[in-house]
């Protein structure tokens, strides 16, 4: 099926998910721009337009956005852990605030935000910041898709594989089935495909769509 070529701005496009997403979007014929710090522009995949700027600054993000853009917000602390609560406040929170502000100013078409599965018994500081990001999107009344993965398996991110047998058992038990589904693992391929689907199939205007782990997994099927 032919897909209309779209203008997509990606913040965090030099990271774990962003680089693969840019490559996939370009392969599908979309026009991609990546906002990156000057020190990181060399890491943006070839074929994407590069905008040097600060993804934590609303004016910088605004300068990178064009009316009618879809924005994929991927800025975040790498390898999040309970020990990184300070980074969540210094990077994750101001970056989504800057992106939401820019989206309001420029009247973007669609904002796509990678949040985290909720509720969860651990990573409270991380969950609080991502929930705050979701709240900003709702308050701004943007057309948006919020994806809620728990952990994304891929190169350098494989240690939870040892938990897969436990997940299988939990999914079979009625008392833990819902939690195992909500906090399940997804692969980098599944995550990228879910983001591509979000870009190409936006929700109805002025609505917010939430995609949890089962929805992320099904995007690649």
Image: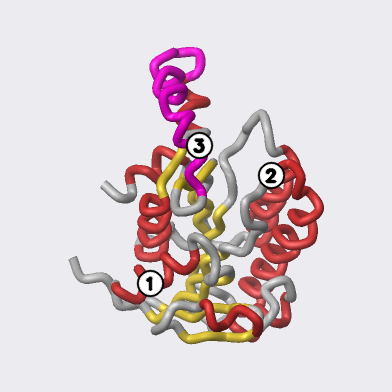
193 left or right of 42 in image: left
Camera-side residue of 92 and 44: 44
Helix, strand or loop for the magenta stretch, by majority: helix
Looking at the image, which residue is at 52% across and 33% down? 183
Whichever of labels 2 and 3 marks the residue nearer the N terminus, that label is 2
The residue segment tinted magenta is 157-176
Residue that badge 2 annotates: 81
Rendering quarter of residue 14: bottom right
Quadrant in which residue 197 is drawn: bottom left
Label 2 close to label 1 by CB (< 8 Å): no
Q: Is residue 167 magenta?
A: yes
* Coordinates of residue 199 in the picture (x, y in percent): 41, 64
Report x, y in % for residue 178.
48, 24
Q: Looking at this rendering, what residue extends furthest in the left direction?
A: 1
- Locate the N terminus and report the quarter of the image it occupies: bottom left
Instruction: Look at 52% across and 26% down and name the residue there.
Output: 179
Disc 1 residue crowd, few under 14, some 14–19, many 20+, Cα 10 Å: some
> Looking at the picture, how far across and down is residue 98, in whole percent?
71, 70
- Between the C-alphas of marks 2 and 3, the distance is 14 Å
**Residue 160 numbered mark, or none:** 3
In the displayed structure, does residue 46 sit left or right of residue 91?
A: left
């Amino acid at each position: 099926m032919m897909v209309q070529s779209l203008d997509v701005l990606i913040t965090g496009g030099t990271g774990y998910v962003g680089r693969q997403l840019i490559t996939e979007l370009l392969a599908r014929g979309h026009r991609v721009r990546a906002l990156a710090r000057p020190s990181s522009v060399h890491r943006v995949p070839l074929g994407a337009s590069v905008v040097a700027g600060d993804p934590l600054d609303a004016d910088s993000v605004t300068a990178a956005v064009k009316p009618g853009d879809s924005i994929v917000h991927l800025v975040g602390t790498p390898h999040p852990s309970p020990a990184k609560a300070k980074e969540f406040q210094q990077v994750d929170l101001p970056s989504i605030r800057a992106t939401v502000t820019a989206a309001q100013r420029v009247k973007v078409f669609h904002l796509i935000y990678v949040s985290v599965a909720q509720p969860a018994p651990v990573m409270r500081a991380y969950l609080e910041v991502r929930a705050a990001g979701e709240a900003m999107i709702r308050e701004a009344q943007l057309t948006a898709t919020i994806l809620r993965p728990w952990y994304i398996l891929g190169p350098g991110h494989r240690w939870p594989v040892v938990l897969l047998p436990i997940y299988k058992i939990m999914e079979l038990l009625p008392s833990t089935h819902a939690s195992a589904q909500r906090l399940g693992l997804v692969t980098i391929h599944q995550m990228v495909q879910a983001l591509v689907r979000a870009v190409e199939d936006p929700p109805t205007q002025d609505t917010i769509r939430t995609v949890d782990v089962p929805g992320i997994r099904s995007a690649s099927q």
